[in-house]
């Protein structure tokens, strides 16, 4: 069990560099590497717990890994691939479902355990399955696993997603690159990590148009070749430092990210009274007074990401005024507010809404992280509390952050993971 020990903090000052987006980009590129037999190298991919799980899963499927440096990893997919993703691994990480599209495309069949829900709500995969069916796959759910067969092959199709699901877009995209004919995915997710996946697939020889827009057009090719990639800076980690500055005050620089990935976060924090501006390789931010509360709804990219919502609630807990936060993506992502309440926060939730009344300070307390982003939010809340805060369940934070405590220490905070 990991714990994050957080001392109250004065204004943050300094520069921090964000790590590569291992959790939300790196794991997906590794799954996509199954499509092209051979050796692929991924750079700027720091170790986080979810990477270790993805490596374990891909090894079971037949891939081989070699670390070329602390943040450079090669994956060899030239050996035989066994298209069977077992429950013991899939249940530990939602992104495991990303092997489904590549396995069906490469092997013509796949058996992947259903991932199930988790601490932030039910997480269905109906859109993944319906999209693959539209491409001609036969799909059954048998004994807790998805069994998919491309018999005789996957064919290009036009498919409209009910909702711009990140995972469904990725799975359909990675199946379509080797399908016969042209696939169009409408209402596709537009997250920067998806644009990066499109670019990676094109470097492998795929023919994907429209990455970063709502319409992806994929012209299937016969085969793909291995390619290399360098991950983008983790925008959620960058946003976490912005929120930390909003909570503790101060003036910080964040390197290795782009305003293009954080536009709405910067705008919302600006409306609350922070100054945020782009620099040549990142962002500068200053919070010189207590922030003012504003309402925040979460939406798919380029809207305000649900992954920032718990941190935004933490910011609002110490802002001036009352705000309503609406969670539009997940049905169970407010569980963490009871932990904030243990720190004295005035926050209540009803269905998809939370009402947050800002207080000047919170009280340090022992609390427990239910998931990665809520864990980060509790760490940030501790910066503006009286007395120390101990965040238990720190292993959830480690699923997505390579070194959150170190990043906050670079800004002058007293945070340690033990
Ligand atoms: N959904 C369905 N049916 C589907 C697919 C999704 O109903 O077939 C629903 C889900 O139940 C959920 C919503 O749609 O309520 C969003 O799901 P989406 O598929 O977009 O999310 P995901 O691919 O499972 C990724 C990130 C999440 C992030 C979401 C939304 C990874 C590994 N995970 O999940 O990241 O919240 O997109 O942006 O990329 C995190 O980093 O903390 C995290 C949870």
Image: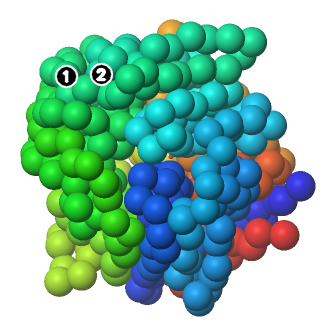
Q: In the image, what residue occupies the spot 68% across and 27% down?
A: 113
Q: Position of residue 24 (x, y in %)?
A: 46, 52
- Which residue position is annotated with label 1? 157
**SS class, disc 1:** loop
Residue 7 visible, this orientation? no
Residue 415, quarter of the rendered image: bottom right
Q: Quadrant of the C terminus?
A: bottom right
Q: Is residue 417 above or below residue 71?
A: above
The crowding category of the residue bearing disc 2, from other C-alpha atoms within 10 Å (few below 14, some 14 to 19, many at least 20), is many
Q: Nearer the viewer, residue 108 or 196?
A: 108
Q: Nearer the viewer, residue 276 or 84?
A: 84
- Which residue position is annotated with label 2? 135
Residue 224, quarter of the rendered image: bottom left
**Proximity of marks 1 and 2: CB atoms separated by less than 8 Å:** yes
Q: Position of residue 255 (x, y in %)?
A: 34, 80
Q: Please state if 130 lies on the left or on the right of 100 as rendered.
A: left
Residue 38 visible, this orientation? yes
Q: In the image, what residue occupies the spot 63% across and 82% down?
A: 67
Which sits earlier in the primary sequence, circle 1 or circle 2? 2
Q: In the image, what residue occupies the spot 63% across and 30% down?
A: 112
**SS class, disc 2:** loop
């Amino acid at each position: 069990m990991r714990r994050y020990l957080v001392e109250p903090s004065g204004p943050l000052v300094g520069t921090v560099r964000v790590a590569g987006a291992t959790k939300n980009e790196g794991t997906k590129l590794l799954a996509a590497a199954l499509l092209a037999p051979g050796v692929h190298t991924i750079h700027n991919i720091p170790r986080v717990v979810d990477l270790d799980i993805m490596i374990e899963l891909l090894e079971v499927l037949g891939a081989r890994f070699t670390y070329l440096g602390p943040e450079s990893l090669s994956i060899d997919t030239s050996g035989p691939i066994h298209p069977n993703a077992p429950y013991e691994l899939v249940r530990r990480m939602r992104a495991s479902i990303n092997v489904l599209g590549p396995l069906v495309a490469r092997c013509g069949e796949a058996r992947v355990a259903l991932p199930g829900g988790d601490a932030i709500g039910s997480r269905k995969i109906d859109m993944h399955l319906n999209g693959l069916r539209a491409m001609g796959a036969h799909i059954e759910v048998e004994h807790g696993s998805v069994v998919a067969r491309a018999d005789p092959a996957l064919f290009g199709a036009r498919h409209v997603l009910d909702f711009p699901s990140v995972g469904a877009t990725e799975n359909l995209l990675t199946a379509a690159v080797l399908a016969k004919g042209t696939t169009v995915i409408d209402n596709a997710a537009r997250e920067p990590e998806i644009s990066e996946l499109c670019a990676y697939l094109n470097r492998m020889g795929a023919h994907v148009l429209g990455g970063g827009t709502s319409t992806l057009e994929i012209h299937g090719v016969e085969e793909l070749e291995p390619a290399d990639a360098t991950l983008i800076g983790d925008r959620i980690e960058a946003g976490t430092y912005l929120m930390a500055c909003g909570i503790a005050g101060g003036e910080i620089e964040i390197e290795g990210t782009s305003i293009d990935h954080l536009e709405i976060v910067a705008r919302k924090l600006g409306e609350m009274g922070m100054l945020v501006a782009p620099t040549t390789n990142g962002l500068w931010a200053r919070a010189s007074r207590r922030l003012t509360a504003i309402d925040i709804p979460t939406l798919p990219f380029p809207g305000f990401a649900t992954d920032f919502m718990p941190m935004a609630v933490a910011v609002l807990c110490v802002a001036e005024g009352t705000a309503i936060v609406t969670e539009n993506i997940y049905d169970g992502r407010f569980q963490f507010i009871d932990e904030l309440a243990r720190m004295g926060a005035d926050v209540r939730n009803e269905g998809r809404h939370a009402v947050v009344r800002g207080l000047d300070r919170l009280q340090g307390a022992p609390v427990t992280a239910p998931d990665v982003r809520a864990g980060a939010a509790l760490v940030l809340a501790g910066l503006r509390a009286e007395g120390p805060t101990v965040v238990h369940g720190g292993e959830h934070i480690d699923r997505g952050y390579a070194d959150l405590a170190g990043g906050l220490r670079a800004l002058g905070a007293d945070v340690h993971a033990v």
